[in-house]
Amino acid sequence: MSIKIDIHKCTGCGKCREVCPGSLLAEDSAGKTQIKYPKECWGCTSCVKECNFNAIQYYLGADMGGKGSFLYTKQEGQLLHWIIVAPDGSRQILTIDKRQANAY
Ligand code: SF4
Ligand code: SF4
């Protein structure tokens, strides 16, 4: 599994469920989102980009050299911040201006 959803942060907005290309995310009985088939997730990060509540963490496993690091996103207008958190709690931030997305 490459993502984890924090149900305490999830507002149930449903944006992540709309974008998952594998329809792997579902609404639970409390109106929150859960991942139905975690082994099917291929880590496309679409849901991570849509969540404005820091409720979805994307885990960078050993196969990606992550050693347990995870990332999440934060939107700020047209800016999308990718925040990478290392196991020791240190953070790195990569900011993408969505208006220039085709330039990367
Ligand atoms: S986008 Fe985030 S807050 Fe909205 S339903 Fe998904 S996990 Fe919950
Ligand atoms: S990372 Fe992609 S495939 Fe995995 S749950 Fe999120 S949207 Fe679906």
Image: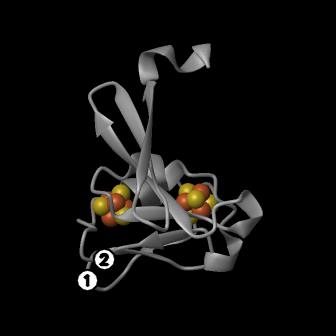
Residue 59 position in % (x across, y down): 56, 65
Q: For the residues marked 1 and 2, what is the alpha-carbon distance in whole angstroms?
A: 10 Å
Q: Which residue is mark 2?
A: 7
Q: Which residue is mark 1?
A: 30
Counting residues from the N terminus, which is met first, the one under dot 1 or under dot 2?
2
Whether residue 87 is visible here, answered yes or no, is yes
Query: Is 16 above or below relative to 62?
Result: above
Q: How many residues crowd mark 1 within 10 Å: few (<14), some (14–19), many (20+)? A: few
What's the residue type where badge 1 is placed? Ala
Residue 65 position in % (x across, y down): 71, 59
Marks 1 and 2 close (CB-CB < 8 Å): yes
Q: How many residues crowd mark 2 within 10 Å: few (<14), some (14–19), many (20+)? A: some
Q: Indicate the quadrant where residue 22 lies.
A: bottom right
| Mark 1 secondary-structure assignment | loop
Q: Indicate the quadrant where residue 72 lies.
A: bottom left
Quadrant location of the N terminus in the rendered image: bottom right
What's the residue type where badge 2 is placed? Ile
